[in-house]
Amino acid sequence: MVERASTPPGLPWDSHLPEQLPYRVSEHEQLLKRFRNRTAFTVSDDKRLSLYQNEIITLARSNPVLMHTILTVTLMHDRFLSPTRNYRRSAVEAYHCYRASTSLQEQLARPLGLAEQAALWTSTALLGIIVFAQLDADTPDEVWPLAPCSTPKVDWVRIGQGKSGVYQITPLLHEDPVFGPLTVIQNPEKEFKLTTGLTLGQLPRPFIRLYGLDDHGTDEFNLYRPALRRLARALDPKCHPVKVVMDFWGFTNMKPEFKALLDDRDPRALLILAYWYMRVNQLGVWWLRPRTVLEGRAICAYLEQYSSDDPDLRSLLQFPKASFGPRDEPLKATIEPKSGFLWS
């Protein structure tokens, strides 16, 4: 018997929220319409966009987990596009995220039909976006790794713990003629013409020296190599955006030992993450930008303060630092794509 998945960690919801808010069905439908006509383009790719805009929305009307998850993402998108660009979640967002989380726990406690599996798969993907997009901070000093030690560590890299369990309990979803395309994105190489990207040996010499890549070591003895291999592929400007995001999400499945390096603010692990933030920030997507810029600036400031004595690290740090902009500069408006192109 397959073990039931747990709720993805780090969901931004408040256990003291009320069970009901005075929301009318018509307001939910207005949010679903905005999801179909706008937000869906930014959380899916071309091959799954129609599915998100039609079957998934229809399914949401009968599935509380999917409904509240879609409403949360859409409300977040509303807020990110507002003139004030407020990055702190509203009470209504927190409420819907809370309801999505509690409904998810209830759904995982019973057998799932095919439609419920599709809803669960989609909800899990969107919840990952919610966790990554939500910071509740306005400046680099308020976020990891600059924030006080009492602040949660790299919470979003643990999304994979819940997602992997969800995928295990939806093993037949890929065979369904309607919802099967939701799962194909797990193997982007099969549907995108991808370049192999750079190899580890083609990285700049400061990378080679800093991470000991010229000693013919293995991933087993060098925890940085798997993350650097993904990064090398993504740094190729010809790499498809879907592949960039998929490799970036690979952080959620990294070995616990590498995640521990991030939690411990290991300088070399932080530099890898800074380069990843720089790369995905170049995609200009609303739910990627706030964390990549704010945490990216925080990482650069932290490394300058505590690790500036290493010449290779100092040299490599200049590229992401320039990309993120000055530490006190307001976040610029995001670039909204005209068609769906992202991981879903």
Image (tube, rainbow, N blue to C red):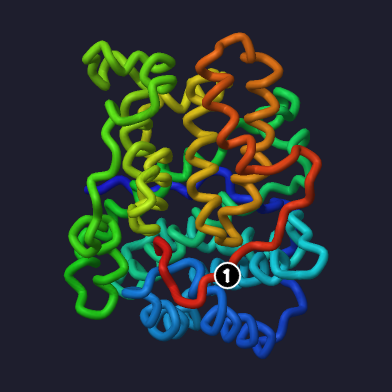
Q: Which of the two residues, 139 or 215, is positioned nearer the viewer here?
A: 215
Where does residue 139 sit, x and y in percent of width and height?
78, 42
| In-front residue for pair 306/68 | 306
Q: Position of residue 344 (x, y in %)?
A: 40, 64
Residue name at image x 76 percent, y 36 percent:
142
Point out residue 60 in the picture as x, y percentages from the top left corner. Answer: 48, 78
What residue is rendered at 67% in x and 21% in y? 304
Q: Is residue 170 above or below residue 25?
A: above
Identify the residue at horizontal 61%, vertical 9% (top origin).
Answer: 309
Badge 1 crowding class, 10 Å Cα cut-off, few under 14, some 14 to 19, many 20 or more, is: some
Question: Which amino acid type corresponds to the residue marked 1 in the rendered image?
Answer: Glu
> Image height check: is 266 above or below 317?
above
> Number of labelled discs?
1
In the figure, 37 relative to 168: above or below? below
Helix, strand or loop for disc 1: loop
Task: Check disc 1 and report the residue beneath it.
Answer: 336
- Nearest the viewer among 124 and 108 is 124
Q: Please name whichever residue, 135 or 305, is drawn nearer the observer in this view of the structure.
A: 305
Q: Is residue 259 left or right of residue 254?
A: right
* In the image, residue 115 above or below residue 7: below
- Which image quarter: residue 252? top left
Check the image and name the residue furthest to the bottom. Answer: 26
Q: What x and y, as percent, mark residue 196?
A: 23, 45
At x 44%, y 47%, the residue is 6
